[in-house]
Image: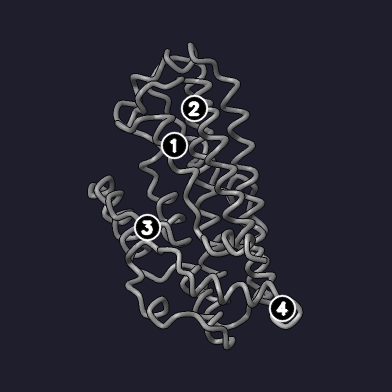
Amino acid sequence: MTDARDMTYAGYLDLDVLLSAQKPLSDQHDEMLFVVIHQTKELWLKQMLHEVALAQSLVRAGDLVPAYKSLARISRIQAVMTQSWDVLATMTPADYLNFREVLGSSSGFQSDQFRRFEALLGLKDEKFLRFHVGRPHAHAALKAAMEAPSLYDDVLARLAASGLPVPADVLSRDVSRPYEPNSGVEDAWLEVYRRPREFWDLYQLAEKLVDLDDALLTWRHKHVVTVERIIGRRMGTGGTAGVAYLAETLSRRCFPELWSLRTRL
């Protein structure tokens, strides 16, 4: 432990390590921006995973109000990440093509932290595990997130504990599988939204979840627009269909019944 009287700003933040992590592979000016943007996103993702873990522990304990803070913080971070696409968009197609080849087969869709975040919100797809076999710690963390109850699983258990009619087969489902919309779950949430005063803590929790989903969809949409602006409809570096692949993700909902119930209110 360093004596607090000797602690410096650079020492506390380990700046020498942090600022030496940017290693562009080309001599192109704009590659530094590309590296910094993506490394920054990974740092924010680390914080988001930290907040989801706290929110899950609070929801499991029935402390819903304190969980709001972590969920709200995640939404704010998502907004910052969305704005960062505007910074990346200052890079023109020609700028990017000058160094794109050095990326090889690497792609943002391989981010283990982003896939962990998705999994913890209920969007689970085990095919992404294959990208991390060479990084045992990342593979283990992602696999654990895939196999564990998601935040939504914990919320639905709390919904049932509050006396609302969540179907038993939902509560006992295989949590390692992607969550599928359920009409019985929609009915349970509908009770919350029709009687918000009676279920105020659950009502507010539900809106915090919608904030997360909304922010994630906004981030995805801005990602699509930015990628199309820079590379058009080219194939993605990781072998995906690029913009076409990203556009498909816009239909995903982490908490589907919280969207569908609105039609029935």
Determine the secondary structure under disc 3.
loop
- Decide if residue 68 is on the left or right side of residue 47: right
The amino acid type found where label 3 is placed reads Lys
Q: Which quadrant of the figure has residue 5?
A: bottom right
Q: Nearer the viewer, residue 103 or 174?
A: 174
Q: Which quadrant of the figure has residue 167?
A: bottom left
Determine the secondary structure under disc 1.
helix
- Distance in Å between CA atoms under marks 4 and 1: 38 Å
Q: Is residue 255 above or below residue 220?
A: below
Quadrant of the rendering where the C terminus is positioned: bottom right
Residue beneath the point at 67% across and 60% down: 72
The amino acid type found where label 1 is placed reads Leu
The amino acid type found where label 4 is placed reads Arg
Q: Nearer the viewer, residue 22 or 91?
A: 91
Location of mark 3 (residue): 124
Of the numbered discs 2 and 3, the one sitting upstream in the chain is: 3
Residue beneath the point at 56% across and 80% down: 159
- Distance in Å between CA atoms under marks 1 and 3: 16 Å
Disc number at residue 227? 2
Residue 3: x %, y % from top left: 61, 61
- Distance in Å between CA atoms under marks 2 and 1: 9 Å
Location of mark 1 (residue): 246
Of the numbered discs 1 and 3, the one sitting upstream in the chain is: 3
The amino acid type found where label 2 is placed reads Val
Q: Which quadrant of the figure has residue 10?
A: top right
- Decide if residue 114 is on the left or right side of residue 69: left
Asked if the residue at tag 1 contacts the one at tag 2, i.e. Cβ–Cβ closer than 8 Å, the answer is yes
Location of mark 4 (residue): 195
Q: How is the image coloured?
A: one colour
